[in-house]
Image: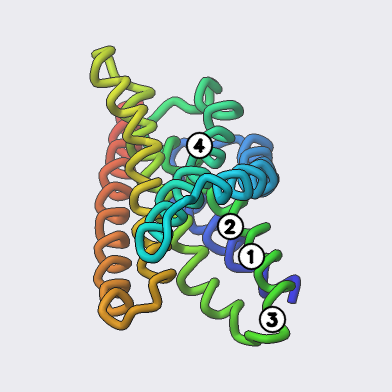
Amino acid sequence: MILSAILPGVVFSLFIIFIDRYDKEPKRLLAKVFFFGMFATIPTIIAETIGQYFNIFTGLYGLLFEAFIVIGLSEEFFKRRVVMRHAFSHPAFNEKLDGIVYCSIAALGFATLENVFYVFSYSATVPDIWITRALLSVPAHMLLGITMGYYLSMARFCNEPGKCVSYMNKSLYVPAFLHGAFDFILMTELPLFSLALIPFVVVLWILSIIRLRKYYKDSKEQHRQL
């Protein structure tokens, strides 16, 4: 059970690290971001518990509040907080691809410990939960990390104060919105919404690959010039 819970996060982390082949990040810093991403689950649980007390709505409105505010905003805030505190101002953060790397690693660290909680809590009643989370939930965290890192790098290397603030805000609110939409689709358990999950995930993958390729090419060109 431990292996099935930890392995997906590790595999996707290695995938992200492999892509960053031209200006590799310090291993110690990557490990630090990963482990602090894991521990970010603790304040997130506290924030989500408190947030539930403010959910005065019922029905779909209650699910909307829970998905977008209680879960989506809380989780993305604390994942981004890890990167802001440990990597954003680090000298190793010297190209746009780095934003995607650090945010994805933080998100996968978060997803790994979250996975451990889910597998140990529900494996008795849902034996194949590790498969669902390995194929859906863990990669979703990575894709949201790519989205967050895309905008965070725009803010990091921006020269116009107004745009810098806008990109910084987007680095939180865009992944939080997508996270909320993802969870809302799952939480409604309505057939119509369930059908929307597949195109939603496909579009998320396509956008993430486009953004990843863009910054990968920038990294390659920067390395060639150096």
**In this figure, which residue is indicated by the disc labeled 3?**
123
Label 4 environment density (alpha carbons within 10 Å; few <14, some 14–19, many ≥20): many
The answer to whether 77 appears left or right of 200 in the picture is: right
Which numbered disc, 4 or 3, marks the residue that appears first in the sequence? Answer: 4
Mark 3 and mark 4 in contact (Cβ < 8 Å)?
Answer: no
Q: Which mark is residue 183?
A: none
Q: Secondary structure at mark 3?
A: loop
Residue at image mark 2: 111
Q: Residue at x 30, y 20 (%)?
A: 164
Picture quadrant where residue 162 is located: top left
Quarter of the rendering occupied by the C terminus: top left
Amino acid under disc 2: Ala
Q: CA distance from mark 2 to mark 4?
A: 13 Å
Task: Name the residue tied to disc 1.
Answer: 115
Tell us which disc is closer to us: 4 or 3: 3
Mark 1: few, some, or many residues within 10 Å (few <14, many ≥20)?
many
Mark 2, secondary structure of its residue: helix
Label 4 sits on residue: 80
The amino acid sitting under disc 4 is Arg
Colouring scheme, one of rainbow, by chain, secondary structure, one colour? rainbow
